Image (spheres, helix red, strand yellow):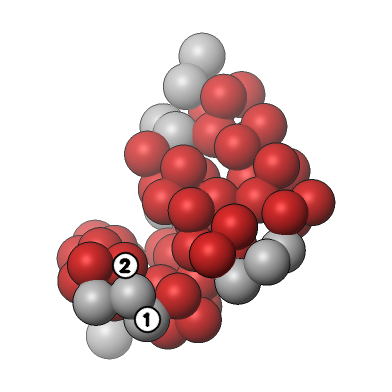
Amino acid sequence: PDNVLARFGLANEALKAGEWEEARAQLEVYLSKYDDEGNGWGRLAEALEKLGRTDEARAALEKGIAASY
């Protein structure tokens, strides 16, 4: 969908279902188009961690912390 908030909702449902790759993909699109204040970055970090991509998860958390200020 073109609505980024709908993508965020889709990503949340994917996280609940354990669909880590789908959640990652939706969150990356969401974050590329929306000025998130940290929550989306934390959720992206969760998906990346579940995918074994810990360095990327750490970077996402750092971006989320920066966005929250």
Secondary structure found at label 1: loop
Q: Which residue is mark 2?
A: 15
Q: Residue at x 70, y 42 (%)?
A: 58
Name the residue nearer the viewer: 24 or 69.
24
Q: Residues within 10 Å of mark 2 (few under 14, many from 20)?
A: many
Using residue 31 as the reference point, say whether residue 9 is left or right of it.
left
Residue 27, above or below 61? below
Which one is nearer the viewer's eye here, 31 or 13?
Answer: 13
Mark 1 burial class by Cα count in 10 Å: few <14, some 14-19, many 20+? some
* Alpha carbons under labels 1 and 2: distance apart: 6 Å
* Image quadrant assignment for residue 32: bottom right
Q: In this rendering, would 3 be left or right of 66?
A: left
The residue lying furthest to the top in this view is 69
Residue 50 is situated, as x and y percent measured from the top left of the image, at: 54, 65
Residue 24, percent across and down?
Answer: 50, 71
Q: Can see residue 28? A: no
Res. 16 image quadrant: bottom left
Locate residue 51, reporting x and y percent.
60, 71
Of residues 3 and 9, which is closer to you in this image? 9
Q: Secondary structure at mark 2?
A: helix
Looking at the image, which residue is at 57% across and 24% down? 65
> Residue at coordinates 27% horizontally, 85% vertically from top-left?
1
Answer with left or right where residue 24 lies relative to residue 8: right
Q: Is 43 above or below relative to 4?
A: above
Residue type at tag 1: Glu
Kindly indicate whether the residue at mark 2 contacts the one at mark 1 (C-beta within 8 angstroms): yes
Percent across and percent down for residue 30 are 42, 64
Kindly identify the amino acid type of the residue bearing the numbered disc 2. Answer: Leu
Q: Return the mark for residue 19.
A: 1
